[in-house]
Amino acid sequence: MKTVDVLTIGAGGGAYPAGFRLAKAGMDVVMIDDKGVMSGNCLAEGCVPSKAIRESANLYKMSEKLDFWGLNGKVSFDYKNIVAHKDNVQKFRYAQHAEELKGALPHLNLIKGHAKFVDDHTLEVKMQDTTETYRAKRGIIIASGSETSILPIIGADLCITSHDIFSMNPKLQVLPKSMTIIGGGYIALETATFFNELGTKVKLFKRSDRILSDEVDYRFSQILRNFLDPNIEIVTGARVMEVERVSDGYRMRYVKDEKEESVTSDVVMMAVGRKSVIPEGTDKIDIKIEHGRIVVNNSMQTNIPHIYAPGDVNGISMLFHSAVRQSLVAANNIMAGNTPIDYMNFKTVPTTVFTFPEGAYVGILPDEAKSMGIKIIEAYSPFKIDARAQIFGEMDGEIREFFDADTMKIIGGWVIGLDAGLLIGEIARLVEGGFTVKEVAEFADQHPTTAEGIVKAARKLM
């Protein structure tokens, strides 16, 4: 048996930030990961490769729209080259992470293997040729992440998933002429808009009567839907029954308004969310699990104080940047002898849906404010008056901020449109700092940038 200070199950965003911080403090940390590389699913098949494809589609879209070369909108591309670019970005970042890991030796080590709990301090690690047992003196971080959810329908195995599009050397190498997407969350919507911009005819089907999850503010989801390209056919209230192979592609059968219908396309993508990956042996140590997710407090501790579960495995905020902050909270509390000194504030974690156009939000939005009995005052600035939006011809969308009517402090906001993923970070900082409408309005944000709209909106309330 080998003894170290801290063990992590996984080496993604919920694990390695803590690993580096603890190693820097002189602790010996071993990360155990099935893939044997750092960065988890974000780099393997998630945020980074998907945005590499998105930005390629964006360049194509802007080139056609602005027609700098006088080609009358006849700009061409090869989808295989887009995939190659995505793969190269992933390879570059994996090499970057490998160099970073070398710099943390000998205190931080990564083992490729499968971890299983033996007891609440001990993990059995199955590697390619051997099995080792590791004991953690100070703590264990469960950062096993999440995996693609699959509907239990006939023909589910015929569907592609985000893995088949965004992983290295993916299954999908040729641009499909038509695509059916099952699901209406952020992965489904993003993929729908990427391929729509590249020329694929996309039809999207969702079980509920709205896009995005029910946890997202309803008005936000409706405004975003209104700005999506109407060429994307969105069918809500549809219950998918079966997928089958036919001579001209794949047929998906579904029920809508009690009537069975079908649609045929080149490919069918299943994008119905992600589920937490629970490590083997957790049942032996009685870690609390609810709805398939490990339960944690805002110190990222499970019901066993020296065992932490940051990131997707707890299901609270399944985003890479959120996992990073959760990981650091866990590290800080381990260094304090598992006595909480650091806490996670999930309300100030920004979320972006990287569709065309982007939609992003943070904090307490109208639906939640109403349920909490908080009276709000709204501030609003449309992109149609924004100089940068006019420059790019991207004038759809808005910046909207929400202030507590009693304190006039900003408690939330959303951005739909150009640069939403960047702007929401600035709004998140304002929410985190509890800035008043006066303080927001007085800031001299840069011109001509879309960030001006944050100030313009607040100035309307002065």
Image (cartoon, grey):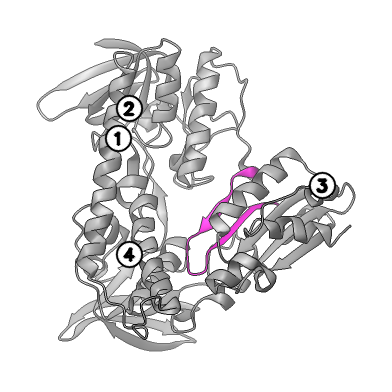
- In the depicted structure, whether residue 211 falls above or below residue 437: below
Q: Position of residue 391 (x, y in %)?
A: 56, 70
Whether residues under marks 1 and 4 lie with C-beta atoms below 8 angstroms apart, the answer is: no
**How dense is the environment of label 4, judged by Cα within 10 Å: few (below 14), some, or many (20 and up)?**
few
- Label 4, label 2: how far apart the Cα atoms are: 41 Å
| Mark found first going from the N terminus, 1 or 4 | 1
* Residue holding disc 2: 100
Q: CA distance from mark 3 to mark 1?
A: 41 Å
Magenta-drawn segment: 348-364
Residue beneath disc 3: 409
Q: Is residue 276 above or below residue 80?
A: above
Label 2 and label 1: CA atoms lie apart by: 6 Å
Q: Amino acid at mark 1?
A: Gln
Mark 4 vs mark 2: which is more N-terminal?
2
Is residue 349 rendered magenta in the image?
A: yes
- Chain-order first, disc 2 or disc 3: 2
- The amino acid on which the numbered mark 2 sits, given as a three-letter code, is Glu
Select label 2 or label 3 by which is in front. 2
Q: CA distance from mark 2 to mark 3?
A: 40 Å
The residue that disc 4 covers is 152
Q: Are marks 2 and 1 in contact (CB under 8 Å)?
A: yes
Q: Which residue lies under the disc numbered 1?
A: 96
Q: Are marks 2 and 3 in contact (CB under 8 Å)?
A: no
Point 52% across, 69% down: residue: 357
Q: Residue sitting at 27 percent across and 39 percent down?
A: 94
